[in-house]
Amino acid sequence: MRMYGALEAGGTKMVMAAFNSEGVMIEHAAVPTRTPEQTVPEMLAFFRRFPLSALGIGCFGPLNLNRTSATYGSITSTPKLAWRNFPILRTFRDALAIPVGFDTDVNGAALAEARLGAGRGAENCLYVTVGTGIGAGLVIHGRPVHGLIHPEMGHIPVRVRPDDPMPEGCCPYHGACLEGMAAGPAIEKRWNCSAKDLPQGHPAWDLESDYLAQLCATAMLFFSPEKIILGGGVMQQAFLFPMIREKTLALLNGYLCHPAVDGGLTDLIVPPGLGTASGITGAYLLAREEEGDRA
Ligand code: ADP
Ligand code: ZN
């Protein structure tokens, strides 16, 4: 039976897995993200234990996804300096001599959710992670969306609430963009408290759901997704879902006519169907795609 490698390359940790051709995860492991010199050999040691037909990488970005570019498959402007301009795809393809599929971590997760998770059956599906950063992957007609570069919806401008105690935000590039206002570190900086420990009913969550609703309403107006799947550490606070739906409806103010909207967005703004496995499953699907064999 053929086997496939999957790498979810994150700024904090690298998650590796081996899948069989039925999409069952056979083994997995994780190593902390240090420098490429330290971390790449550890990852290769894992993957070399399996007779892999292809590898898929869902990677933190921004990335060069332009196949005609000499630096296709590199990480570009990351604040993690050791990884800036690192040719991650080429490194694995040269070392393992197998086809390597490559996309952003969130496009990978969106692909997995669209094929196998909460977005099954949807033609147009947005996956958002709200964690250390905010990232979004968009799958339309079964394909992750690329373009000039790739979507970076975490950095859209938001309308800052007048009562926000941290109106300047904390994105190093934009200050008060969505990520600068609503990612885990923004919550923790604003309230000087771990996001995990802020109780339901704390004003943090009213503000948080407000900013995430701005993303949801914007996404609905831009792409008309059939599913908006919200994952990542912050969305472990499940009470955020009804708050976000309600505020999204308020922003749309009756403009979009569809039963899913009339139904309160309960089946439209949803948690990931694959739980925390969307990213690694997406990397597996990227391996299958690259081999030209759709799972
Ligand atoms: P990453 O984005 O690094 O892959 P996560 O998605 O777990 O990892 O995001 C980490 C961020 O999510 C942290 O800033 C943390 O504050 C926040 N977070 C993690 N778990 C929870 C939780 N249960 N409730 C609220 N926030 C959480
Ligand atoms: Zn930003």
Image (cartoon, rainbow, N blue to C red):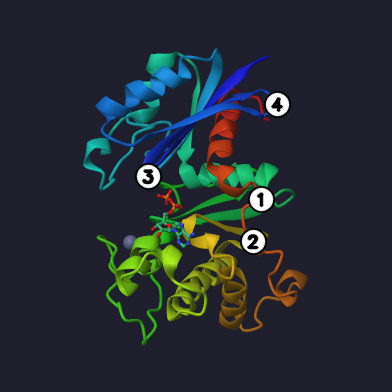
Q: Where is mark 1, residue-wise?
A: 273
- Asked if the residue under mark 2 is in contact with the one under mark 1, i.e. CB atoms within 8 Å, the reply is yes
| Mark 4 nearby-residue class (10 Å; few <14, some 14–19, many ≥20) | few
Marks 1/4: CA–CA distance: 18 Å
Q: Quarter of the picture for ligand 2?
A: bottom left
Question: Amino acid under label 2?
Answer: Val
Q: First in sequence: mark 1 or mark 4?
A: 4
For residue 61, the mark is 3
- Residue 68: horizontal and vertical position, in percent? 40, 31
| Mark 2 nearby-residue class (10 Å; few <14, some 14–19, many ≥20) | many
Question: Amino acid under label 3?
Answer: Gly
Question: Amino acid under label 1?
Answer: Gly
Q: Where is mark 4, residue-wise?
A: 22
The answer to whether residue 111 is above or below residue 270 is: above
Residue 47 relative to residue 188: left or right: right
Residue placed furthest toward the right: 259
Judged by depth in the image, the label closer to the viewer, 1 or 3, is 1
- Relative depth, front residue between 131 and 135: 131
Marks 3/2: CA–CA distance: 24 Å
For residue 270, the mark is 2
Residue 194 relative to residue 175: left or right: right
Q: First in sequence: mark 3 or mark 2?
A: 3
User: Does the image show residue 89?
Assistant: yes
